[in-house]
Amino acid sequence: MLVTHKTHRQLRIQNTVFLVLLLSVTSALAWLSTRYSFEADWTAAGRNTLSEASTVLLDQLKDPVSITSYATEDENIRRSVTSIIKRYQRYKTDLTLNFVNPDLVPDEIRTLGIRLNGELLIKYQGRQETLKNISEQDITNVLQRLARSGDRWLVFLDGHGERKAQGTANHDLGNWVQHLEARGLKAQAHTLAQNPQLPDNSSVLVLAGPQVGLLPGEVKLINQYVADGGNLLWLTDPGDLHGLMPLAKALGISFEAGIIVDPTTQMLGLNDPRFALVAEYPNHEVTKNIEALTLYPQSVGLKVTPLPGWTSHNLLRTEARSWSETGKIAGSIQFNKGSDVAGPFTIGVALTRKIPSPETPLTGKQSTGVKSTTQRIVVIGDGDFLSNAYLGNGGNLKMGMNIINWLAHDDNFIDIPVKMAVDKNLQLSPMAQGVIGFGFLFIIPLTFAGAGLFIWWSRRKR
């Protein structure tokens, strides 16, 4: 092609226009990259992407979610927390994550019960819950509990010297109830003498250690509540049942004589021999994820003979060295083979039975086509372990929260399938390893060297 002054000018114009367009497109793409982002999970199992169950739940959360991580300045911890929370933020833009150095807010840490570096505080619609195990399954289940639909009313029987649900005395349950209310549950006291009818919206009836005998009519109402399929938490104490023997009989429960004594607690620096220790737990929804010891200040052993239709599960069992002291507890005490009862003892049981659905009247018979649900009852041989004075010991608070969640049927946790990192390791056969090694060490370098020599030789011949 003949290059003239005119064609030379046209080529310069073309090059200039091309350069301007290239810079304009590059600048536009750079600006768009600051406003929009795109991420793709190319892992074989999609382990960096939320499961369908989590995304469906996030779609149901209409209000903002706030997550606070109490983590030190350790970048490794903060990076791992940010990594998993970002998966949720991709689907819910009003989910926020903030970091707080726990060393700077010691009072807040004590109030919330934060113990682990990086522990989360998740808030939704005025409710909150802390989370130690940071995984998709745990985070999704917390969000599910915080977004629980409908009201869960806990009705505390009152008028017989019971522990007060809103009380601040050492023996009351105010601190425990505050934690329950922070998780969306509601509590109210009810006196049968004033209103001989339990509220229809009662999710769980709580008998928190009455100190005065109940009237026969009140016991009859409680028994009718149980017969109709109501869920019950009975926190009993050693000694007199104060008129609740018919309830114990209806549940197939009897009590050991005396107060449980556990010498194991002396090794923990507890001088009161009436403390009972539980260190191992069965595989049950109530005891799930409880690893800390739980302490029971004054407990009584339970013996369960399930009645027809009922199924029992032992939840709490004392150490083998414990015994039930039938004599006076004062000074130095020891096991008396003649009068005392050797342990270990069951001090916590869960009872379940299938009943007709709430929409269908209870007739004692299961009608054809009627759905079944599960009635749940928990009996603990100690009411002090959830009191204000002892709630902070070991895993007592966690145990109390699990008991209520189970009784209120809030244990239907979302099961997130475990995503295996199948593509994390590359396994090659010895032949493949040899080919790759020989190729990188010899074939590729020789190929480049040969190509260079060929180009050099070709140019030299010109």
Image (cartoon, rainbow, N blue to C red):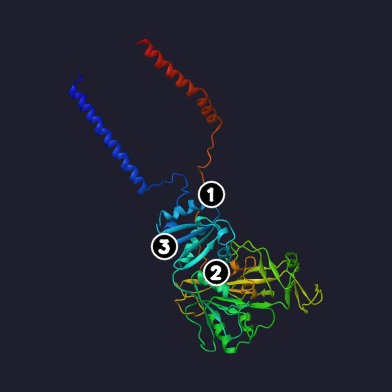
Badges 2 and 1: C-beta atoms under 8 Å apart? no
Q: Nearer the viewer, mark 1 or mark 3?
A: 1
Query: Which label belongs to residue 124?
Result: none
Does 1 appear above or below 274?
above
Indicate the secondary structure of the residue bearing disc 1.
Answer: helix
Which residue is under mark 1? 75
**8 vs 126, nearest the viewer:** 8
- View extreme (left): residue: 6
Indicate the secondary structure of the residue bearing disc 2.
Answer: helix
Q: Position of residue 147 (x, y in %)?
A: 45, 66
Whichever of labels 2 and 3 marks the residue nearer the N terminus, that label is 3
Which residue is under mark 2? 406
What amino acid is labelled 1 in the image?
Glu
Whichever of labels 1 and 3 marks the residue nearer the N terminus, that label is 3
Indicate the secondary structure of the residue bearing disc 3.
Answer: loop
Q: Position of residue 24 (x, y in %)?
A: 29, 39
Which residue is under mark 3? 64
